[in-house]
Image (cartoon, coloured by chain):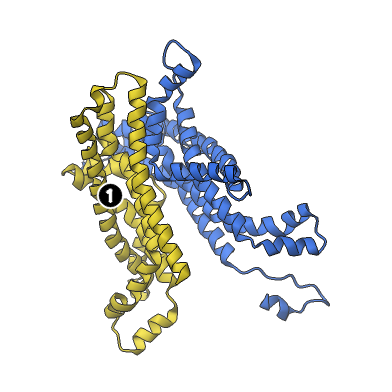
Chain colours: A yellow, B blue
Amino acid sequence: MTVFAPENIAFIMGGFVRTVEISALAILCSLILGTLLALVKQFCTGRLCVFRWIVSIYIELFRCTPNLLWILFIYFTVKGTDIFISVLAFTIFTSAVMAEIVRGGLNSIPDNQFEAARSQGFGFAAMLRLIILPQTFRTIIPALFSQCTTVIKDSSYLAGINVAEFMYTTRVIMAQATNLSQVLLLYGFVFALYFILNFGISLFVRAYQRRLVAA
Amino acid sequence: MLEGILSANRWHLLFTQMDIFWEGFFFTLAVSVAGLALSMILGTLLGVFSTTRSRALRAISRIYVEFYQNTPLPVQIFFMYMAGPQILQAILGAATPVRIAPFAIGSLGVGLYHAAYVAEVIRTGIESVPRGQLESARSQGFSRAQAYRYIVLPQTFKMILPPLCNQALNLIKNTSVLALIAGGDLMYQADNFVSSSGFLQGYIMACALYFLICFPLAILVQVLESRSKRRPRAKVIPGITTDLDAKEA
């Protein structure tokens, strides 16, 4: 059973750590960019309306084309480390989804919150930072975390451009497998680890939602 | 790479090779339709399972949904592509690994994956119609079939149509996973063009073609969503209801 030698397992687990790193960075970056996009789409009216149009086009473009297309596109056009390319590709793609999630949250904030903030003399930036955005983020936590699951799952597309993430490292070791049962065991291992990671997140979301309902 | 984007020869070369793009485009469409059919049938079945009183059926549905929602589609596809032929060989007792056509892997892959999501949509749809709706319909003399036909199902459909269309949209995008296993779909053909010619125009064309299928669906989702949010209005029946009643309803 040389396939399951300690150094092979360590190599595979290195890929798992890489997957988690890439996903976490991509989620963080796309949340920041997505929030900005959502704010532009929501609040740029009147003379600034052109920005709203640009953001709408951006969002629709990325929502209507596959993730893999942008991974390959970035891989071909941008030079940099594997992590940089991966995070960049996921950020431009996922921020479109994040923008829609944040906008959903912004829409759920009652108008009187805005009015009350204004009447208390808050400026636009202070109102967003202190009153609107904290409430927005609290309401979108479930959607945000299910998007995390999606990013973690989609990061396995990166095996297609030879980024040494979990699926890729496992495939490298799998090439040494001599019989079917070894292949099946390795796949079982991959499925199990992805499952534990994502199921953990979905359990957290469910617990959080129950708390919201109870509150 | 980017500087050649406006180059006329490169675009010309792209248009001389458009037939492989159309081939990929129609392959992607065919896989999507087959996958969609599978995911709707299996998803509806699993969704209904999860609302029955049988513990076993509920467990089957739950395990299926959790497994498919929490593991990546590319891994599932790689599994079918790499281990599938050997598993079939072992089961069928064939002499050599049994080759599975990319079309079968693709439609089975996205079909099984999205069935889990469709099942959840169907489940929430069924659960969202209050039981009292069925009971009150029955008490008004509707037969069971009529109650479903006129009262329960219209309410369910209105709720689940937008997320179902959203799943169709995601399914079409996800067929691009076939490019990872040389499946001959649109993404694969585009990637082939780009890696053999070195011209980015291939990706731009793929982007346009995907957009062509998916954007109308995205619009449809928005229309359906705004329609499902509109509150139902009572019909005006002369002599029985007034316009005022209709507005309040």
Position of residue A15 relative to residue B231, above or below, is above
For image coordinates 49% across by 43% down, the residue present is B63
Q: Residues within 10 Å of mark 1 (few under 14, many from 20)?
A: many
Outermost top residue = B95
Q: Quadrant of residue B133?
A: bottom right
* Residue A71 image offset from top left, x and y in percent: 29, 43
Number of callouts? 1
Give x and y (percent) for residue A77. Answer: 22, 43
Quadrant where the image shows the N terminus of chain B? top left
The residue nearer to you, when weighing B129 against B53, is B53
Answer whether residue A50 is visible to the viewer in this image.
Answer: no
Query: What residue is drawn where x is 35% and y is 59%?
Result: A98
Q: Looking at the image, which is closer to me, A92 or A17?
A: A17
The image quadrant where one finds the C terminus of chain B is bottom right
Give the residue furthest to the left.
A80
Q: Is residue B238 visible?
A: yes
Q: Nearer the viewer, residue A210 or A35?
A: A210
Q: Amino acid at mark 1?
A: Ser
Q: Regarding mark 1 in the picture, which secondary structure is present there?
A: helix
Find residue B117 and report its horizontal and vertical position in percent: 50, 47
Query: What's the residue at 76%, 73% (across, down)?
Result: B236
Q: Quadrant of residue A101?
A: bottom left
Residue closest to the eye, A212 or B238: A212
In percent of width and height, residue A32 lies at 27, 62
- In the image, what residue occupies the spot 36% across and 29% down? B181
Is B173 on the left-hand or right-hand side of A23? right
The relative height of residue B124 versus residue B140 in the rendered view (above or below) is above
Q: Provide the residue designation for mark 1.
A: A23
Chain of the residue displaying label 1: A
